[in-house]
């Protein structure tokens, strides 16, 4: 059978790194083909070359047996190639439908596209409201818009870069059904994911990259997570040591926090009650768009409309305090969006440390530039960030390496309370284990941590207690040892009741 796509000797050199080095890869019609590698292995660069967003320095591309030069995404789409980026390519000020319409051939009206979006999103279980402005969507909801946009192009080759990183387990299973249906119809799929269970369950073939080179090709269904890890990073990820929590003082207390939504598509928070103590990790599960953004904004100080007394840090009312004041009192925050909120894309890593770290700012606001550079260099070394040094722009890093830098920036200041949203989004298994290990070490040192994640396995691995956020309401908390994935999955639909494990003494349990 003639391959749908064949790459021969593809190479791409950047100033600081050779992203792709003589890569050969073939994808057959109807094949779901995984591309696996650690952060910075060259996966995203290779996908961008196929999609025409980046031009290779060397090598050839054959499409259905014919040599082609894909000079732009427009030319790629004309061939039948569609791509869902890990970092979304959406215009914040436009609606979901307008964003989708821009990527199509304009043969249909905007109203017709809205109708198609509603039909396809319902068919595949990827709920998307066509009329919602993108700036009101959570990361998970934006992911759905990207996937639906790709599906509407009726692709011959679909490239998915971390498509499930912010989807719930239920949504992942629905997506897998969709992808298998597409493959059965002859669509080829290139699938990038760091979730090894997904690759083993879904993909027919797997090409492994390390350091920009192909290091192996395997049938993932015949491999174990351990063997795939060894191919990808040269070793198995370290096992986390999760010892029994030793609870200290009450650090964060949220009492009857109700907050009206600020835009028509937001979620109103209703009577939120939550406590986090020193030396414990409390995990928040939930489907995107159920109030996560609103709760994180209220806790971080981005939204200061909370009623007085509803948010306390060590007993001090911070409900209407600024983010700077909260940081001075020991509260640090890692947002779910890396580029734009966690880091400024065009600024260097050294400059990005100044977003939340002020120790290098002298009297009168003068910067100690040497100290800023050293701080960034220390973070790069400690958290094994692959970057061209402190002067590298944030946007030049792979998603996983930027995530390690941002999380490291907040961990290294030794916070008293750390709030983290999606701590390992798009991070490879080795880096994910490293980040989770650092969070556990912080907890064992007496820090209180609140972790919001849409990966239930991550929450079960990290958390001492779990709560669920659904429709702006918070479930009772349950010790992780007494919870199951099935139970939390039900609670994510708001189906909690009074038949639940008793809460430990002193724990807030009202919804």
Image (spheres, grey):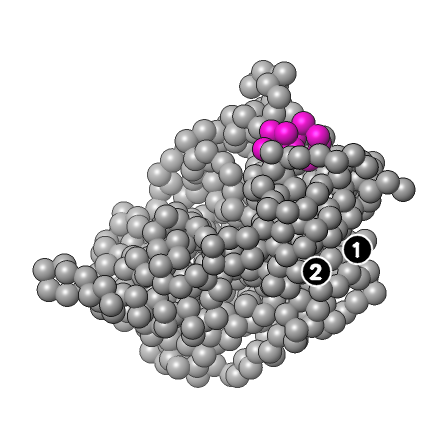
Instruction: Look at the image and tell me whether residue 188 can be seen.
Output: yes
Front-most of residues 199 and 468: 199
Whether the magenta-drawn stretch holds residue 77 is answered as yes
Q: How many marks?
A: 2
- Give the SS element for disc 2: strand
Placement of 464 over or under 153, stated as above or below: below
The overriding secondary structure of the stretch rendered in magenta is helix
Residue in the foreground of this view, choosing between 157 and 319: 157
Q: Nearer the viewer, residue 157 or 342?
A: 157
Q: Is residue 34 above or below residue 138?
A: below
Checking the image for residue 205, the label placed there is 1
Q: Quadrant of the N terminus?
A: top right
* Mark linked to residue 197: none
Residue receiving disc 2: 214
Quarter location, residue 158: top right
Across and down, in percent, residue 306 comes to 29, 51
273 displayed left or right of 215: left
Residue 28 in the image: state x and y as whole percent: 82, 44
Residue at the image point whose x is 49% and y is 64% from the top:
386
Q: Secondary structure at mark 1?
A: strand
Circle 2 residues within 10 Å: few <14, some 14–19, many ≥20: many
Query: Which residues are the magenta region?
Result: 72-81
Q: Image point 30% across, 50% down: which residue?
A: 302
Q: In the displayed structure, does residue 100 sit left or right of residue 505? A: right
**Residue 494 visible in image:** no
Q: Is residue 482 left or right of residue 95?
A: right
Please name which of the two marks, 1 or 2, marks the residue nearer to the observer: 2
Position of 200 with respect to 20 (left or right) is right
């Amino acid at each position: 059978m003639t391959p749908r796509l064949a790459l021969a000797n593809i190479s791409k050199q950047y100033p600081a790194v050779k992203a792709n080095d003589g890569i050969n890869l073939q994808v057959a019609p109807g094949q779901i083909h995984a591309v696996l590698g650690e952060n910075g292995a060259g996966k995203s660069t290779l996908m961008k070359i196929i999609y025409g967003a980046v031009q290779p320095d060397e090598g050839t591309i054959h499409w259905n047996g014919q040599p082609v030069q894909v000079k732009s995404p427009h030319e790629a789409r004309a061939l039948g190639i569609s791509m869902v980026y890990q970092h979304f390519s959406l215009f914040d000020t436009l609606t979901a439908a307008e964003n989708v319409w821009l990527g199509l051939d304009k043969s249909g009206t905007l109203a017709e596209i809205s109708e198609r979006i509603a039909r396809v999103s319902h068919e595949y279980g990827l709920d998307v409201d066509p009329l919602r402005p993108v700036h009101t969507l959570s990361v998970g909801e934006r992911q759905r818009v990207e996937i639906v946009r790709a599906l509407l192009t009726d692709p011959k080759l679909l490239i998915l870069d971390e498509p499930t990183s912010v989807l719930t387990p239920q949504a992942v299973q629905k997506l897998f059904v969709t992808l298998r249906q597409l493959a059965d119809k002859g669509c080829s799929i290139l699938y990038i994911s760091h979730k090894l269970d997904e690759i083993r369950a879904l993909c027919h073939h797997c090409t492994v990259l390390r350091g920009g080179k192909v290091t192996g090709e395997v049938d993932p269904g015949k491999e174990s997570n351990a063997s795939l890890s060894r191919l990808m990073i040269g070793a198995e990820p370290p096992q986390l040591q999760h010892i029994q929590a030793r609870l200290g003082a009450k650090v964060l207390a949220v009492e009857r926090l109700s907050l009206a939504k600020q835009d028509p598509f937001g979620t109103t928070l209703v009577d939120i009650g939550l406590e986090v103590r020193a030396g414990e990790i409390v995990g928040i599960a939930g489907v995107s768009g159920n109030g996560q953004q609103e709760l994180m904004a209220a806790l971080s100080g981005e939204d200061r409309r909370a009623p007085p007394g509803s948010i306390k840090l060590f007993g001090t009312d911070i409900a209407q305090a600024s983010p700077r004041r909260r940081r001075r009192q020991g509260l640090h925050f890692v947002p779910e969006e890396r580029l734009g909120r966690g880091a400024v894309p065009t600024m260097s890593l050294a400059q990005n440390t100044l977003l939340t770290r002020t120790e290098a700012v002298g009297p009168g606001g003068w910067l100690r530039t040497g100290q800023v550079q050293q701080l960034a260099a220390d973070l790069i070394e400690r958290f094994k960030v692959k970057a061209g040094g402190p002067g590298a722009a944030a946007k030049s890093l792979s998603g996983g390496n930027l995530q390690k830098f941002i999380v490291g920036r907040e961990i290294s200041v030794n916070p008293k309370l750390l709030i983290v949203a999606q701590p390992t989004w798009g991070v490879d298994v080795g880096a994910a284990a490293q980040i989770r290990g650092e969070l556990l070490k912080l907890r064992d040192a007496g820090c209180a941590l609140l972790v919001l994640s849409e990966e239930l396995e991550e929450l079960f691995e990290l958390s001492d207690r779990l709560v669920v956020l659904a429709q702006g309401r918070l479930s009772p908390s349950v010790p992780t040892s007494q919870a199951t994935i099935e139970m939390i999955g039900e609670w994510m639909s708001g189906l909690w009741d009074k038949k639940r494990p008793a809460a430990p003494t002193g724990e807030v349990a009202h919804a």
